[in-house]
Image (cartoon, rainbow, N blue to C red):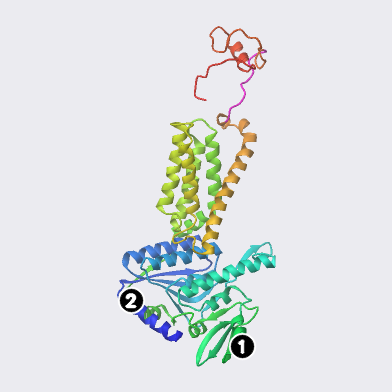
Amino acid sequence: MARLISILSWLLLIGTTARAGGVTHMRIEGALDGGTLSHLRRAVEGAEERDDLLLVELDTPGGEIELMWQLARALAHASESGITTVAWVNDRALSAGALVALACDRIVMRSRASIGAATAVRIGPTGLMPISTDPGVQEKFNSAFRSQWRGWAEEHNRPGVLAEAMVDASVEVFLVERELERLLVSGSEWDDMKRRGEPVHLLRTIAAQGQLLTLTGGEALELNLVDALGESLDEVLDKSGVSTGARTEVLRESSDEMAAWLESYSLLLLAGGILFALIELKAPGFGLPGAASIACFAAMLFGRHLIGLADVVHILAVGLGVVLIMVEIFLVPGTLWAGLSGGALILAGLILSGLGPGVGLGYALDRALLLDSASNVAGALLLGMLGLMTISRWLPSAPGFRRLVLTAPESQGEGAGRGQIGSKHPVGSGSQSPDSVAADAVAVGAVGRSLTDL
């Protein structure tokens, strides 16, 4: 029955895509990075503009968890926008690449291609390591990760237990037969069936204890994880019903490489923008630190816009926040509401610009991505403040930067710097010599008149 449903859904896809204008084809090759997001954004925009089917060709060993989730959510968002997405696993869709494939409406594989092996790891001093050395923490993470992959697979009408076995080696999967129906069951489900005495027969073990699941194209088709086999691009297009339509190739460009480079330095740009902004707040007027701060924020937001994370609304929020803070400083000092509102807009814009389209709070990884973005902003703010404290120690004596801080006046004769207690004339009375004024200016309890805004 499951196989029949898969065939019928594939035929429905062919009938749907046959009416599309053509196909937009992109190839993801090598490790996933920020440039992959930029590449995908351009492909999605082109497919939407031309009313094309989007074909994502995969040959990747994977990438970071956050990036994996952003790519998957971007593909899901494209599907919700009316774009039919098809993944073609030409060689491998391993680790994070497996979820990118599962995020598409349909999956086609070459018979000898591979998909799976998606356990979550981190990079340590000795290479790849588990997320945590604490077994309790590791199992807590694995449990959440399993449920997310299972939910994602089942949402796309694919066996969730296979997705679980790809991310956790402790998950066993068996192919069993019950009343002439073949079923995929986990190890615990198989044990429950035997305890209940159900008439089930074990056909074979798909994923053994302690082994991550990796499937070839033929195996994945047999187990209903993928929808069809395709050995060449023309065969995939033919099975998708768009072989006679226009084909648009979206290649990875230099702008994608620049986007990847900017994203890799986004935290440093964010910290630099905050540091220069804090320095500017200590300086009179508007000068080089303010311009450097704007340049850092602009480069970071531009990079995030290229990869499809920062939308126009996020950039406008940060820009409006900067304007409100400048209004607070130069036009209505002391009112607070303009400065606080500007600060809130900047923080919200910076945090939300790190999420991407389709990311909300529906999944645990959505919430983890939001927390990670907020942590990056908080960490950059802390780095900026520490940088300001460090610079403040040598800034007063640094050439070219003395105007940024207030320093004590240089001595002007013997009387300068000594308190003139009991002076008969207040500072600015006009009857004192310059030396006397300078002396009274530093006296305890002296009276003076401010000539400029404090």
The mark nearer the N terminus, 1 or 2, is 2
| Residue at screen point 61% across, 82% down | 187
Part of the protein shown in magenta: 405-414
Q: Position of residue 243 (x, y in %)?
A: 34, 78
Quarter occupied by the N terminus = bottom left
Q: Which residue is mark 1?
A: 194
Viewer-nearest of discs 1 and 2: 1
Secondary structure of the residue carrying numbered label 1? helix
State yes or no: residue 410 in magenta.
Answer: yes
Magenta residues: mostly which secondary structure? loop
User: Do callouts 1 and 2 mark residues in contact (Cβ within 8 Å)?
Assistant: no
Q: Which residue is mark 2?
A: 16
Rounded to the nearest angstrom, the CA distance separating label 1 from label 2 is 43 Å
| Residue at screen point 64% across, 69% down | 139
Q: Position of residue 21 (x, y in %)?
A: 30, 71
| Residue at screen point 65% across, 15% down | 416
